[in-house]
Image (cartoon, helix red, strand yellow):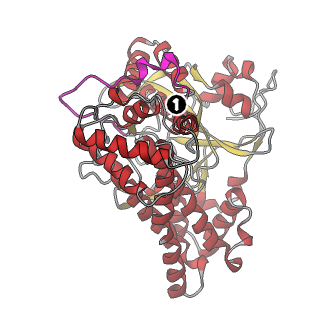
């Protein structure tokens, strides 16, 4: 497939630095054309931020690019190689259905990956068809854009196109391709692959590339040990990211090492979902029968994944293996405290608390314990407190909640900031709405079965400013109807 003549300047400004890495890190691969591409979701604000021509992208020409039928000028399509521990088991992987078109350089000089997900078979497909169904691609669009609106680092979604041809899973489903935007697609699994399949020099080239792309100031730290700094900086970003997940009740569902980025962005929204009733053991993934990736386990799994990154980096951290292990272990030991401090600070903010007191931890854990005991909705409990309407919380009327509420009010009274300032802090820390699972399913069902995208568009509009506390968000804050079966999600292969 070759570049075609363009009558309109869409605004593509591609570079292809990833293709300069050692050959083992990727395979040049064009997307497989599809029959009848049609844009069904398009992210105008993101397109503008990328410096793209909105009108041109919404044309047939834009649909052709988003479908992989046309390669934009300057792009150099490739599939990335990587490995990963999937549910604890190491596997050689790679982009089995994704094609990196290249890196768009934005008007602000930022470099971001433009990737087509569901764009056909690659050498890493392992028997798969390389395609994707419309439901999982729209799910990723909804959840990733919701995460962005919540202020959580994430890959983003530029567009979804229907392909006009079915994909076969348990039954035939309408096919689709997602255009994903990421700071990069460098993963812990990328380093595991380089360590296992390449030379130490290949690993060094990859690490230098990652440092240049995400941590350009690394040479300033730790006596010039830039590879130790790389590990430390990834640990810091992941500690902050996982705390943000926990604070909004987000369950990723498949925290394999190939789904942990070096940039600190959330990636891959397959079996993910947001918790309704507060329960630390919440699992949504249909295949996570042991609860490895349950809500409460996410910080521990993050630490485990980071240890796998450290193992891959050992030859670069120090030439003496014992010294390298010691330095890596010291770095890894910081994760728990970093994560917990982020989480504790975030919980204080959710309760309108500006400064630290020793009793805060007990106050927070007491509330969470009551929420679990009484089956309270996680988001709506904090929403009720933010609105100063404790009577609408599921805990209302219990003696223990009344006692807790009194302690909380006394705690707020001991700080210099006013009640108004506390409420403002709470409003900026507690979303009024999240992408409720039943609302997401409602939108996906309308799109898949009726070709009706208005349900999704309205949902996206409501979720675009989750801290607004606007009247139109009221109905979307409602908890789902009771169901005899737990909500389950699937990997969307």
To which residue does mark 1 refer?
Answer: 141
* Residue at position x 58%, y 47% in the image: 416
Residue stretch rendered in magenta on the structure: 468-493
Work out which quarter of the rendered image holds the C terminus and state it: top left
Work out which quarter of the rendered image holds the N terminus and state it: top right
Which is nearer the eye, 6 or 323? 323
Spot occupied by residue 440 in the image (x, y as percentages of width and height): 41, 25
Q: Is residue 282 left or right of residue 73?
A: left
Classify residue 336 by image quadrant: bottom left
Q: Give the answer, above or below, for where 76 lies relative to 318.
A: above
* Residue at position x 23%, y 25% in the image: 482
Question: Callout 1: helix, strand or loop?
Answer: helix
Q: Residue 472 in magenta?
A: yes
Q: Is residue 167 left or right of residue 470?
A: left
Q: Can residue 108 be seen at all in this image of the molecule?
A: yes
Spot occupied by residue 420 in the image (x, y as percentages of width and height): 56, 34
Which is nearer the eye, 482 or 420? 420
Spot occupied by residue 358 in the image (x, y as percentages of width and height): 44, 61
In this view, which residue lies farthest toward the left? 484
Crowd band around label 1 with a 10 angstrom C-alpha radius: few (<14), some (14–19), many (20+): many
Classify residue 40 by image quadrant: top right
């Amino acid at each position: 497939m070759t570049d075609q003549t363009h009558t309109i300047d869409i605004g593509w400004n591609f570079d292809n630095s990833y293709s300069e890495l050692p050959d083992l890190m990727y395979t040049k691969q064009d997307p497989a054309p599809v029959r009848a591409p049609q844009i069904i979701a398009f992210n105008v604000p993101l397109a503008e931020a990328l410096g793209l021509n909105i009108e041109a992208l919404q044309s047939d020409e834009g649909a052709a690019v988003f479908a992989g039928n046309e390669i934009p000028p300057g792009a150099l399509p490739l599939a990335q190689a990587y490995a990963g521990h999937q549910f604890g088991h190491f596997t050689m992987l790679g982009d089995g259905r994704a094609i990196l078109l290249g890196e768009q350089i934005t008007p602000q000089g930022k470099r971001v990956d433009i990737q087509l997900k569901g764009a056909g078979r690659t050498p890493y497909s392992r028997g798969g068809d390389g395609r994707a169904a419309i439901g999982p691609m729209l799910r990723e669009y909804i959840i990733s854009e919701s995460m962005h609106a919540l202020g959580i680092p994430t890959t983003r979604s530029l567009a979804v196109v229907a392909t006009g041809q079915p994909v076969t899973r348990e039954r035939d489903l309408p096919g689709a391709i997602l255009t994903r935007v990421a700071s990069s697609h460098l993963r812990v699994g990328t380093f595991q692959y380089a360590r296992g399949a390449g030379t130490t020099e290949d690993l060094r080239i990859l690490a230098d590339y990652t440092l240049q792309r995400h941590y350009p100031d690394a040479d300033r730290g730790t006596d010039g040990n830039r590879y130790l700094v790389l590990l430390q900086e990834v640990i810091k970003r992941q500690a902050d990211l996982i705390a943000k997940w926990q604070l909004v009740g987000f369950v990723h569902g498949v925290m394999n090492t190939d789904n942990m980025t070096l940039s600190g962005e959330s990636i891959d929204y397959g079996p993910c979902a947001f918790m309704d009733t507060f329960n630390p053991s919440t699992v949504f993934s249909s295949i996570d029968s042991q609860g490895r990736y349950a809500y409460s386990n996410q910080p521990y799994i993050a630490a485990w994944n980071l240890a796998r990154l450290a193992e891959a980096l050992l030859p670069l951290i120090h030439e003496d293996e014992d010294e390298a292990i010691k330095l890596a272990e010291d770095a890894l030991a910081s994760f728990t405290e970093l994560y917990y401090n982020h989480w504790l600070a975030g919980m204080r903010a959710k309760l309108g608390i500006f400064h630290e007191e020793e009793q805060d931890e007990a106050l927070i854990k007491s509330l969470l314990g009551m929420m679990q005991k009484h089956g309270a909705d996680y988001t709506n409990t904090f929403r009720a407190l933010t609105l100063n309407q404790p009577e609408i919380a599921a805990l209302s009327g219990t003696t223990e909640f009344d006692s807790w509420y009194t302690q909380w009010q006394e705690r707020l009274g001991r700080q210099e900031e006013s009640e108004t300032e506390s409420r403002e802090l709470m409003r900026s820390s507690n979303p009024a709405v999240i992408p409720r699972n039943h609302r997401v399913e409602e939108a996906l069902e309308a799109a898949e079965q009726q070709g009706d995208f208005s349900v999704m568009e309205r949902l996206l509009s409501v979720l675009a400013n989750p801290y607004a506390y606007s009247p139109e968000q009221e109905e979307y804050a409602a908890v789902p109807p009771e169901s005899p079966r737990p909500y389950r999600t699937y990997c969307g292969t």
